[in-house]
Amino acid sequence: MTLPQPDPPREIEIRAIFAVLRRQIRVIAMTTGVIFAAAGLFLLVATETFTASALVLVDPDQKGILDDSRNFPSSSGRENAKVDSEVEILRSDALALSVIREKGLMADPEFGLQTSLADKLARAVGVAIAAPDEPDRAISRTLNSFKQARTVRRKGLTYLISVSASSNSPQKAADLANALAQTYIDRQVSTKVSALLKARNVLRDQMEAARKAIADHELGFDRFIANNLALMDADASSADISRLSTRLQLLEAERSALLESAPDQPAPGEAGLLTAGARQDGAPAAENADETQQRLRQIDTDISGLRQTLRRSVLSADLSPDMLTGLYTFQQNANIAREQYQGLLSKMSDLETRAKIQIADSRIVSPAIAPVQPTFPNRNLVLLLALASSLGVGISLALLKEFYIGGITSPTQLAELVQQDSAAPVPASYETNANRMSIADGIVDAPLSSYSESIRKLRATIDQKLRATGPAGPTAANPQAGAPANGRVILVTSSLPDEGKTTASLALARTYALSGRKTLLIDADMRKPSVHRHLGHDPQTGFVDFLMDRADADMAGSFYARDPASPLAVIMGAARSTFPTDQLLASARFQHLLEQAREVYDVIIIDSPPLLPVVDARYLAPHADAVVFLVKWASTNQGDIRSAVEPLTEAMAPGTALVPVLNHVPEALGKSRYNGYSGYSAAT
């Protein structure tokens, strides 16, 4: 015989997802409320931070005011390197320390070293001692705080650099951003000026050496003339040379005498040798000089003129070749030294001019202004993140609770978990009656109660599923038989103990019996029989004794009785079994009992042990035409339900109807939807 294939699992539908969210709306709402409360508290206690930004434009060509063209060809790589270098300079600690000193940030509570509560208490009692490294620690703390508050980044691939600063005060943020940018500009100019002045100082040393060389060469020229004057021929030119030399000596003697009377004047011979150089250096004369100083200047002028005349006369005289060669050598060396001095003087003047008009390679194109809105905390962003995280966390917790850790709270949830249509939920009955021994007595005492109505709905669901599956299938003893038995076997089980199997089995059996159908209730939970207590019986022998007896036993024994409240027949247990009972349920005696029961009764209901603790229910499932799987409301773990349903469906015969039922549902949850039909209850 070909066994029918099981139905494929149903795909998750959008409606099912919304149903899950609707069932877990409380979890989502609570999660959203908690996260929004945390976000609101954060917004209340968070210190507002304002950020201001200034824009600096970098000129990668490094052109000055006096430059007419670039110093070298431009390239994108060089320009990018230049801009990136300026960004790193703006991020340097040296620049940050300059701003810290300029703005006095070490004394600012926001950036400076803050005194801890412990230090305050220690100082209050007079035991605080300043640490030796406190200044360094204060500088380091302020520097770190400022570096965290400032941000320097290049704007894409442009020449623009954004310089930002953050502070609790909007005006302070703008001041710090502008101070950082302006300090960068000023240091850039000062660095260039410093480099030019250093070059000028080097040239000044070289000029001094050139000046001394000029003086030495001129002094050597004059000494050469004086030493060789006697060797010249006695002619008119020689007489003129001698007269000029005598007059020069007289003037120098007069100058020496005046210098002795005015010791603050230059040393003898220095002014005469370097008069031209002094004039070129622009040494101004005192406006209110006394007569001695005026005479000295006149003597210096005369000495300079006489020397020039003497040199020309000597060069035009009839001299020997050796003398001419010596004189020309001294004159040429003096001219070369003078040209070097003039070149160095021109370069030094150019450097001084450049230092005075030097400009920075960068400029501030957009100074920072005080911001109006704080950048932290961003209220809209915080609320948006709170909304997104609350929905994400809430839905995640809802799905986790729905499919894994939470209990079942609705028939729809149970149906989706078990992949079978669920019957109407069975409410928890809290009605008290001194004469009742079981909640199932309400089937007889309160037939119009919500509990009784739910049991009748369960019976209707079972009947519909049994009609859909056709006549009862072959018996377990003869699985190849084609003729079905008359009675239908309904197994009532659950995942774990204390989920209401016995009460539901008795109540369901009574509804069948009261409807006029021959019904038998079998207490097959031989590990823990309890049907007899619900009926008020105290049998001496139980169902387990019947199954163990090899001889025929009288069915009218103490384990078989009639329900005192209905036409229901009951096979009860007595005491707990002290040995495994699964072999008894798999025995031929039990199968024969069920075959006889099918022939006599229309409905046989079996109260079975739970599926997870013991194996007995797996031996009962193949005999059932329908299995009622009870789940306790908001109590049974979903993992336990999955662990129980899988072996149950594997043990069930093909075509057996599985009816999941949510048990012990609070009555308030069911009444809210049908308040308009309260007239149908027994209380009205």
Image (cartoon, rainbow, N blue to C red):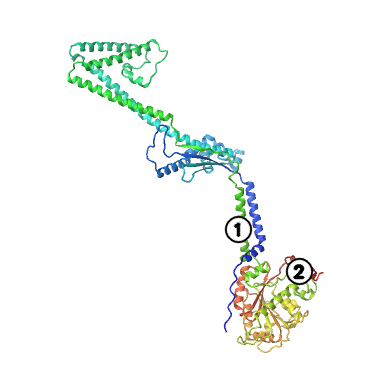
Closer to the camera, 136 or 29? 29
Tell me: residue 562, above or below residue 161. Answer: below
Residue bearing mark 2: 430
Quadrant where the N terminus lies? bottom right
Q: Is residue 89 left or right of residue 317?
A: right
**Which amino acid, mark 1?**
Gly
At x 62%, y 72%, the residue is: 419
Q: Position of residue 254 (x, y in %)?
A: 31, 11
Examine the rendering and report whether any part of residue 525 can be seen: no
Closer to the camera, 611 or 186? 186
Q: Is residue 184 left or right of residue 508?
A: left
State the image quarter where residue 210 is shown: top left
Q: In what element is the residue under mark 2?
A: loop
At x 23%, y 13%, the residue is: 241
Q: Which mark is residue 392?
A: 1
Q: Earlier in the sequence, mark 1 or mark 2?
A: 1
Crowd band around label 1 with a 10 angstrom C-alpha radius: few (<14), some (14–19), many (20+): some
Q: In what element is the residue under mark 1?
A: helix
**Which amino acid, mark 2?**
Tyr
Tell me: residue 297, above or below residue 445. Answer: above
Q: Position of residue 467 (x, y in %)?
A: 68, 80
